[in-house]
């Protein structure tokens, strides 16, 4: 198995050992790893956000399992093909955000005219990169989603709950249609994400309701 996929497996096994909350989703990722198609080497788009921040993320992956995946990604370029997100092509309010955000799907369905390095119809998994000082506004999708922070940090909101700082080694679970938002401050965010159900879901923006919640102190 490739170094990237081995690192993903180690992260999932660590999450399973931590407790039951993420169990179904992590087991679905492991199930997907058992049935991947052959490698179809991918090529990354040249994106300014990747050029500017991916290198610095390698120094910000301050957790052993996160560092292992980040290092593997740098060695196995053909497993990690960076693209601009295609989720908001028809959303003019997201044009600026999209210049500061990139995604690389490692396995999953081929969507938006793009081919994943490995095909899977069991789960979709990849990494996202968000530049510093960027708000990813509240959005949701039918797919149940797991995030794992690899490098840097972000403040994270689920539903209308309190904003919480997420750092390397943290997992986040988004249930189906649960709104979530991420804000970076002075460093970028590199995170592994996985959709573990409803892989053909569309992502949609969610209007925030009610007053802004208080932030958790640093
Ligand atoms: Fe999401």
Image (cartoon, helix red, strand yellow):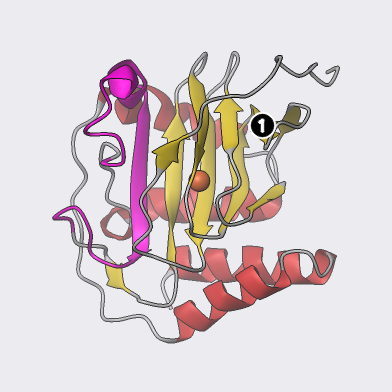
Image position of 67 with respect to 48: above or below: below
Q: Nearer the viewer, residue 111 or 176?
A: 176
Please give left or right for residue 157 compared with residue 95 in the image.
right
Q: Give the residues in magenta.
A: 86-114
Q: Which residue is mark 1?
A: 156
| One can see residue 145 in this view | yes
Q: Is residue 113 magenta?
A: yes
Give the image location of residue 174, x and y in percent. Answer: 62, 51
Please give left or right for residue 210 compared with residue 138 in the image.
right
Furthest residue to the left?
A: 113
Query: Residue shown at 50%/32% (left/top)?
Result: 206
Query: Residue shown at 19%/52% (left/top)?
Result: 112
**Under tag 1, what secondary structure?**
strand
Query: Residue shown at 41%/72% (left/top)?
Result: 2
Give the image location of residue 21, x and y in percent. Answer: 78, 64
Image position of 106 with respect to 61: above or below: below
Please give left or right for residue 10 compared with residue 191 in the image.
right
């Amino acid at each position: 198995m490739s170094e990237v996929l081995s690192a993903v497996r180690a992260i999932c096994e660590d999450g399973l050992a931590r407790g039951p909350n993420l169990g179904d989703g992590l087991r679905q990722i492991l199930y997907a790893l058992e049935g991947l198609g052959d490698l179809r080497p991918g090529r990354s788009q040249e994106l300014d956000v990747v050029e500017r921040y991916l290198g610095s993320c390698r120094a910000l992956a301050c957790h052993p399992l996160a560092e292992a995946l980040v290092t593997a990604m740098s060695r196995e370029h053909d497993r990690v093909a960076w693209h601009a997100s295609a989720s908001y092509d028809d959303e003019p309010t997201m044009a600026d955000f999209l210049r500061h955000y990139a995604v690389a799907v490692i396995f999953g369905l081929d969507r938006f005219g793009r081919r994943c390095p490995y095909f899977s119809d069991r789960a979709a998994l990849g990494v996202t990169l968000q530049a510093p000082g960027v708000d990813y506004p509240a959005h949701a999708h039918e797919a149940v989603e797991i995030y794992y922070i690899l490098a840097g940090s972000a403040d994270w909101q689920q539903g209308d709950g309190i904003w919480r700082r997420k750092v390397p080694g943290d997992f986040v679970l988004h249930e189906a249609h649960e709104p979530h938002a991420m804000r970076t401050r002075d460093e970028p965010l590199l995170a592994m994400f996985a959709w573990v159900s409803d892989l053909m879901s569309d992502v949609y923006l969610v209007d925030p309701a009610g007053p802004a919640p208080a932030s958790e102190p640093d």
